[in-house]
Amino acid sequence: MFITTFVSTREAFAQRSARQSITVAGVRRTFVLRTPRAPADSGALRPAVIVLHGGGGNAENAEMMTGFSRLVDREGVVVAYPDGSGRARTRLLTWNAGECCGFAMDERVDDVAFIAALIDTLVRGHRVDPRRVYVTGMSNGAMMTHVLARELGTRIAAIAPVVGTIFGVESPAPVPVPALIFNGMRDKNVPYDGGPSRGIGRNAWNSPAQPARRQGEFWARANGCDDAPARDSSGTVVRFVWRCPAGRDVELYAITDGGHAWPGGRAGSRVGDTPATEVDATALMWAFFKAHARN
């Protein structure tokens, strides 16, 4: 039913792993938070990245797959890994991205309200700059990233969905949001050319995926960019770049031998696709994020 599989990362982050919680509309929601060890300079605010796990994962799974926590001390960034919802509470979790996935979609969980409350918590309690809040996610988390950019676009400085999709039923985005997108051309769970999932997530969706480039086209329209992107390739990586107004960039990295995995990261399970090594998605998106801030 699910798009990625939960794997415990206790051995990798045991010394720093502790869930925190907030209550949203009477429901306890949890997240793992990583903050820099060094105190911020007096009056200084930090950027924050919210990393959404894939369907069937959880916060630790997202931390392990993406490696974003490596940047916390080096870059002075706050990283939050929220948990989705599920019957098991701490594993096999999903996000309600409208047309996907599983428990969260079926129960109509208000994940937009959760992430809005999480942003409030980061800004008020952890010296996060409200102009520099970024969101990324994998698979179902990437789908949710698109939803958040549409619903909370005035509070999100840029997004970076990984092996996700849109479904062609979305309303236009009300505000521009810079977007850096990653997809694998050999992905069976979220097919690059669109259509129904051919992987383990095939029963978790209400609508088939749109071709990967539709994500870029969606944000290019929202951001006032040219219709047709420039295309260049190097090895197994094809990069599409739309010409956009300053600060509204839209790019798509298509990995010709890439599957359903976080490029440059770790596989989500023993049977998960092997991540492509030609691209380090975490490094690329952090550079992209640093170049963008909300006005």
Image (tube, rainbow, N blue to C red):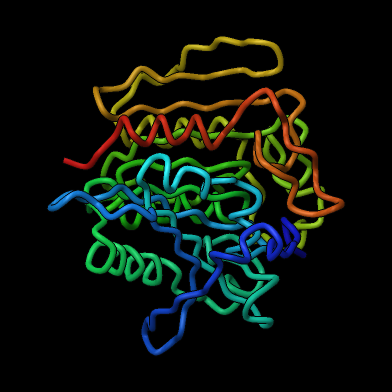
Give the left or right position of residue 267, taking residue 76 as reference: right
Residue shown at 38%/83% (left/top)?
A: 23
Task: Judge by depth and name the residue closer to the eye, 72 or 188.
Answer: 72
Image quadrant in which you'd find residue 112 = bottom left
Quadrant (top left/top right/bottom left/bottom right) for the C terminus: top left
Q: Position of residue 214 (x, y in %)?
A: 53, 34
Direction bottom: furthest residue: 26
The residue nearer to you, when weighing 195 against 213, is 213
The relative height of residue 195 versus residue 24 in the rendered view (above or below) is above
Residue 225 percent across, percent down from the top left: 33, 24
Among all residues in the image, which is located at the extreme left? 43
- Closer-to-camera residue (8/235): 8
Q: Is residue 258 above or below residue 199?
A: above
Q: Quadrant of residue 101?
A: bottom right
Q: Which image quarter holds the N terminus?
A: bottom right
Q: Residue at x 51, y 50 (%)?
A: 69
Tell me which residue sits at (63%, 42%) in the image: 163
Q: Residue at point 58% right, 64% down?
A: 59
What number of labels is visible?
A: 0
Q: Is residue 75 above or below residue 62?
A: above
Q: Position of residue 125 (x, y in %)?
A: 26, 68
The image position of residue 38, as x and y in percent, is 33, 52
Q: Nearer the viewer, residue 189 or 260?
A: 260
